Image: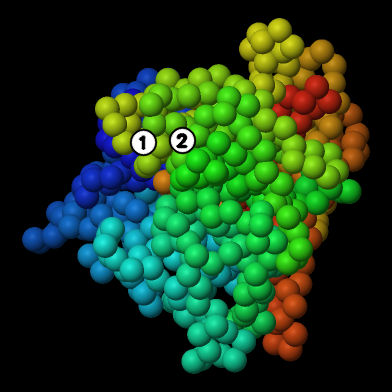
């Protein structure tokens, strides 16, 4: 059990999970998921008193990090913006090396429950969207802004006409709107969030570094407002398939018992395909986690009990995909709950309001069991024996080829897939940056793979534009091998630059 109530979780490249507490102080907890003993697995970061000021892990005890938005920087540090700070315009950075928070530039607007989306530029820029200007009673913030990792400063986003052109402002759901960076460099807005929203599904295309325009997409008939729903970007795992966005659950009887899927990039005539959960149960404030094999784990969102989890598998080619009923959660997981993929290829579920919100449940997906439902031994899993180790100063360049040593697991198998998975940083069921990226690989020798990293794409900036990596931005990723039996390895962290 967690020693404090947590509502934020982020997987650090050290392998530990950073939890941010609901309380003012102490507010930062580190957890080693590989340590089965609570007394040593959890570490509340200590405090320091200087003069009349007391800080815990660098944060004054009068500040509250809860209800912020967050995204990983290129060097593996975590940017956290807004939340229950005194001004709600404060931004902080957590450094896994020092295990301390430090303040960075101040936002243009105060934001409570904002969404962050890393843009994938070489310079390192993060789009900050939505939220309200005060807790609960505040009004929605329609203006977008960008954090520049190089300068530590925030700048406002304008329409194509530049400063004064407010056409880039948008009425998102007030809290934690769903946005995803698609492989063509556009931002896709899904109608999910912690409050309802009036504007339809849309995509934002940058016309310059600090300006761009929205275009509404998908037909109005299938475009539902999924208040208290969740969405995830599912990148293609087969070359001939489309990239997709999956939206799950909602806040009313028409959306809560359903899922919807749409191909991206979408057009004004693209339709959302909708289907029902097999059990017909309504799910609101639901968690969705993209798994290494391209499927998605769905859990929580049921008020009366934990309820059954679901596994979504996208179709090969066109279609809605399938939902399969999984095990039942032990505890209700709705508001303030989080779910996160671990390097073990398992999923944790924790948080939620109620007496059991300090518990952690661990879900083992079907790929960790045999056909009889018996847990697979470690020897059946692929094992990564050598790789570009960032702890040794080794990096992976975009478009480069690198070598991975492996064993494929017993009985004798071969490696079928190599994937990179972006570590999650999730709160209030929200992590819009999840991405599972399938890599090209060949067997280059006995138990040796030759793997090609993703190359960059170029935004349609025109003159003065820059190079970008919309599929896989710079930063740390989990590297998984999946064998022909569909069994994943334990992940190793690599650093893509």
Q: Give the label, 1 or 2, closer to the camera.
A: 2
Residue 97 pos. (x, y %): 43, 50
- Horizontal placement of 187 versus 452: left or right? left
Q: Nearer the viewer, residue 87 or 147?
A: 87
Residue 196 pos. (x, y %): 45, 57
Residue 354 pos. (x, y %): 29, 31
Give the Cα distance between marks 1 and 2: 10 Å
Rendered view: 278 above or below 76: above
Rendered view: 408 above or below 176: above
- Secondary structure beneath dot 1 equals loop
Task: Report whether residue 403 is seen.
Answer: no
- In which quarter of the view is residue 109 placed? bottom left
Q: Say which residue appears at 61% left-offset and 31% top-offset.
A: 277
- In which quarter of the view is residue 188 placed? bottom right
Q: Say which residue appears at 30% left-offset and 44% top-offset.
A: 21
- By what rule are the colours in the image chosen? rainbow
Residue 493 pos. (x, y %): 62, 42
- Quadrant position of the N terminus in the picture: top left
Q: Which residue lies under the disc numbered 2?
A: 301
- Secondary structure beneath dot 2 equals loop
Rendered view: 241 above or below 117: above
- Mark 2 Cα-neighbour bin, 10 Å: few <14, some 14–19, many ≥20: many
Q: Which residue lies under the disc numbered 1?
A: 352
Q: Nearer the viewer, residue 463 or 352?
A: 352
For the image, the number of numbered tags is 2
Q: Say which residue appears at 70% left-offset and 87% top-offset.
A: 464
Using the image, tell me which numbered label, if any, was put on residue 168: none
- Horizontal placement of 350 versus 190: left or right? left
- Horizontal placement of 233 versus 226: left or right? right
- Quadrant position of the C terminus in the picture: bottom right
């Amino acid at each position: 059990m967690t020693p404090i109530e947590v509502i934020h979780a982020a997987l650090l490249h050290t392998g530990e999970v950073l939890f941010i507490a609901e309380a003012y102080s102490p507010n930062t907890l580190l957890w080693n998921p590989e340590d089965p003993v609570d007394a040593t697995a959890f570490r509340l970061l200590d405090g320091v008193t200087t003069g009349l000021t007391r800080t815990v892990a660098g944060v004054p005890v009068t500040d509250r990090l809860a209800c912020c938005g967050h995204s990983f920087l290129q060097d593996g540090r975590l940017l956290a913006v807004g939340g229950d700070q005194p001004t709600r315009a404060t931004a902080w950075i957590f450094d896994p090396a020092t295990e301390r928070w430090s303040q960075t530039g101040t936002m243009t607007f105060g934001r409570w429950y904002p969404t962050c989306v890393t843009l994938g530029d070489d310079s390192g820029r993060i789009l900050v969207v939505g939220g309200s200007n005060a807790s609960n009673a505040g009004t929605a913030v329609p203006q977008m802004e960008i954090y520049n990792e190089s300068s530590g400063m925030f700048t406002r986003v304008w329409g194509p006409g530049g400063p004064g052109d407010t056409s880039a402002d948008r009425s998102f759901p007030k809290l934690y709107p769903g946005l995803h960076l698609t492989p063509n460099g556009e931002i896709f807005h899904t109608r999910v969030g912690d409050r309802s929203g009036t504007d339809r599904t849309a995509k934002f295309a940058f016309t310059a570094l600090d300006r761009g325009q929205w275009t509404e997409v998908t037909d109005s008939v299938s475009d539902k407002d999924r208040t208290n729903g969740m969405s995830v970007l599912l990148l293609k795992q087969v070359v001939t398939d489309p990239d997709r966005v999956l939206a799950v659950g909602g806040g009313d009887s028409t959306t809560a018992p359903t899922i919807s899927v749409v191909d991206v990039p979408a057009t004004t005539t693209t339709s959302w395909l909708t289907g029902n959960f097999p059990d017909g149960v309504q799910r609101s404030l639901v968690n969705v986690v993209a798994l290494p094999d391209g499927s998605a784990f769905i859990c929580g969102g049921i008020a009366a009990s934990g309820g059954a989890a679901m596994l979504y598998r996208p179709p090969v080619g066109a279609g809605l995909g399938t939902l399969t009923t999984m095990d039942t959660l032990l505890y209700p997981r709705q508001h303030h709950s989080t779910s996160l993929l671990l390097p073990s290829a398992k999923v944790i579920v924790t948080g939620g309001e109620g007496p059991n919100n300090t518990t952690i449940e661990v879900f083992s997906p079907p790929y960790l069991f045999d056909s009889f439902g018996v847990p697979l031994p470690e020897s059946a899993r692929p094992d990564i024996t050598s790789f570009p180790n960032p702890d040794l100063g080794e990096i992976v360049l975009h478009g480069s080829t690198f070598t991975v040593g492996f064993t494929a697991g017993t009985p004798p198998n071969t490696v079928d897939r190599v994937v990179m998975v972006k570590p999650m940083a999730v709160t209030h069921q929200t992590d819009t940056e999840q991405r599972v990226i399938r890599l090209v690989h060949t067997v280059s020798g006995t138990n040796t793979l030759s793997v090609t990293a993703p190359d960059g794409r170029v935004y349609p900036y025109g003159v003065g534009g820059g190079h970008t990596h919309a599929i896989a931005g710079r930063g740390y990723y989990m590297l998984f091998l999946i064998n022909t039996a569909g069994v994943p390895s334990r992940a190793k962290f690599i650093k893509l630059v």
